[in-house]
Amino acid sequence: MLGRAGSPLPGPALWAVCGNAALARLRLRPGHPHRMNNWPGQKTGTCLGGIEGKRPMDRAGHPDRRALLVGGVVGGVVALTGCSSMGVVSSAASASPEARPTTPAAAFARLMEGNKRWVSGDLQHPDRDPNRRQFVAQEQEPFGSILSCIDSRVPPELLFDTGLGDLYVMRTGGEAVGPVVTGSVEYGPMTSGTPLIVVLGHQRCGAVKAAYASIRDGKPLPGNLQAIVKALQPAYEQAAREGGADPVETMARAQVTLTAADLRSNDDLAPLVSKGALAVVGAFYSLDTGKVEVLAGAPS
């Protein structure tokens, strides 16, 4: 046993554990005849009591009745309270998950509540345990589809404080779209009734910055990076018309609003939008604050 600052305690101690954590220690006089050097580790959820030091058979003498009595009391109390609390934890962990939002407004509210927690640091980390893994193992019904950038600082599941099975997530450089990406965004609303799509741009986007410089200077990017530049051309043109102190951020915001508008008027998604079963929201994430700003399309 170790005392303060890692120093050995001067004598054996009576202790009780529930799981692997020591919960109580009582001092015994040095040289007590019924000490145990080691007590085998126990699996979580079991409770026991014991005395550190030598085992009873290692030395002659009769048991110290007061020590054994205290040990029995401590072990019994821990067994009743500690193991009972394990049952409470297990029961809570197996509780039903929060109901899935089924309307655009409810899904949007769930996401924005999660983002508020992300900003404040008061995170819940919902739907991230083995019970949830089992719950969604056979089928999924995400309540939102997020199209965001590949930037490592913008993970949708974290900044909306969501969990396993909550979101479909598509990530491309600068939220560039094409037939495969558009089809991936359509998948949730068209196959499982996902009521919300969010196109999420962000501050200081490297893909947008590179595309902006490429178009401005007339210098194509190497390899398939040029495909991203081509996809972002409309946003560049809109940013050029709008002007502004930071043309790259203006272009990043334009990419969001243009992409959200295209999806909203998509031949397959427009009917869902018109009857109120789907909302397509354009949003912008601040790397500095963690806050998601809504640009367009928030459901009422």
Image: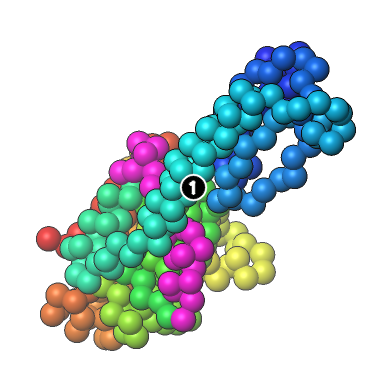
| Residue 299 image offset from top left, x and y in percent | 17, 62
Relative to residue 16, is residue 127 drawn left or right?
A: left
Please give the name of the residue rendered at 49% of the width and 68% of the height, measured from the top-left corner. 133
- The quadrant the N terminus occupies is top right
Q: What span is colored magenta in the figure?
A: 116-138
**Does residue 226 sit above or below 122 in this rendering?**
below
Is residue 132 within the magenta segment?
A: yes
Q: Is residue 197 visible?
A: no
| Residue 238 image offset from top left, x and y in percent | 33, 59
Is residue 128 within the magenta segment?
A: yes
Please give the name of the residue rendered at 44% of the width and 41% of the height, measured from the top-left corner. 81
Q: Label 1 crowding class (10 Å Cα cut-off): few <14, some 14-19, many 20+?
A: some
Residue, far front: 62
| Residue 266 image offset from top left, x and y in percent | 28, 80
Q: Secondary structure at mark 1?
A: helix
- Which one is nearer the viewer's eye here, 115 or 184? 115
Give the residue type that dot 1 points to.
Cys
**Does residue 188 sit above or below 53 in this rendering?**
below
Q: Which residue is mark 1?
A: 83
- Which one is nearer the viewer's eye here, 155 or 92? 92
Please give the name of the residue rendered at 24% of the width and 77% of the height, measured from the top-left corner. 265
- Which one is nearer the viewer's eye here, 263 or 25? 25
- The quadrant the C terminus occupies is bottom left
Please give the name of the residue rendered at 22% of the width and 71% of the height, measured from the top-left corner. 102
Q: Is residue 46 visible?
A: yes
Relative to residue 253, is residue 265 drawn left or right?
A: left
